[in-house]
Image: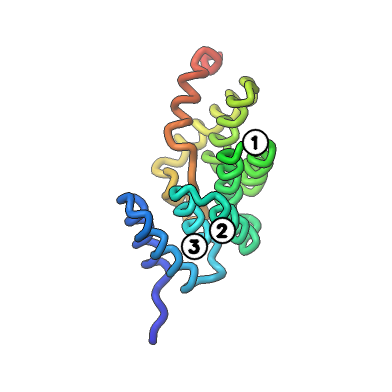
Amino acid sequence: MSREDPHSILADGEAKLAAGDLDGALQAFERAVAAAPRSAVARSKLGLTYVHKQRWDDAAAEFSRAIQLDPTYAPAYSNLGNVYRERGQIDQAIAQYQKAISMDPDYWIAHQNLGVVYKQQGRVGEAVREFKIATRLSLRSPGAGEEGPARTGGRRVGCLGSGGTMLVGIFGLGPFLRR
C-alpha cells in the first residue's frame, strides 16, 4: 500500500476550503497530517480549518503543534494569535504576532494582524505603523495572499490574515496615514 502524497492532499484540502467545503477540507487536512505527521504546514492547515469551524481549542492545539515542529514557522504564531484575539486574549495575541514578526520580519500578515489589535486597543500610532509596514510588504510581495506562499519554498503556506480588516483599518485611519 503506497502512502498518499502530502502535497496533493494539501492541494485537495485547500481547494475544498476555498470552496467552503469545511468537512471535506477537514478530512483532507487530517489525511495530510497522517501522511506527514511532522509537517508544520499540514498542522497549520488543519488548524485553519478548525478556525473556520470555530473550534478554537482544536485550532490552538494544531497551531501549537506546528510551532513545536518548526519553531521558525511564522504563520503558526500569527494564526495562534488570531485564536487568542477571537477569545479576547489580546495580550497573548500581541505576543504571538510579535513572535511571528521576529521569525519573519517581512511577513506582512502578522504586521496587519498586529495593527488590527493595536487599533482595537486605541493604540493608533502603533496601529498606523503596523498597517504601513503591512501595506509596504504586501505590495513588495505580489500574489502573497492569505493562502499562498510569499517566497520560494512555501514558508508562508497555511496562514490566515484578518481578511478585509486591513483595508477597513487603513481607511478608518486615513487621516493618520497621510502624514
| Residue plotted at (55% across, 61% down) | 40
**CB contact under 8 Å: marks 3 and 1:** no
Mark 2 residue element: helix
Say whether residue 35 is left or right of residue 8. right
For the residues marked 3 and 1, what is the alpha-carbon distance in whole angstroms?
Answer: 26 Å
Mark 3 or 1, nearer chain start = 3
Q: In the rendered view of the protein, which quadrant contains the N terminus?
A: bottom left
Q: In the rendered structure, which amino acid carries the disc numbered 1?
A: Ile
Q: Which residue is mark 1?
A: 90
**CB contact under 8 Å: marks 2 and 3:** no
Q: In the rendered structure, which amino acid carries the disc numbered 2?
A: Glu
Picture coordinates of residue 33, whole percent (x, y): 49, 68
Mark 2 or 3, nearer chain start = 3
The residue sitting at the left extreme is: 19
| Residue plotted at (56% across, 14% down) | 179
| Residue plotted at (47% across, 31% down) | 165
Say whether residue 42 is left or right of residue 129. left
Picture coordinates of residue 5, whole percent (x, y): 40, 73
Picture coordinates of residue 62, whole percent (x, y): 56, 58
Q: Is residue 20 visible?
A: yes
Q: In the rendered structure, which amino acid carries the disc numbered 3?
A: Ala
Mark 1 residue element: helix
User: Given this view, does label 3 or label 1 mark the residue nearer the observer?
Assistant: 1
Mark 3 residue element: helix
Q: Which residue is mark 2?
A: 62
Query: Which label belongs to residue 42?
Result: 3
Q: Nearer the viewer, residue 30 or 146?
A: 30
Q: Is residue 106 visible?
A: no
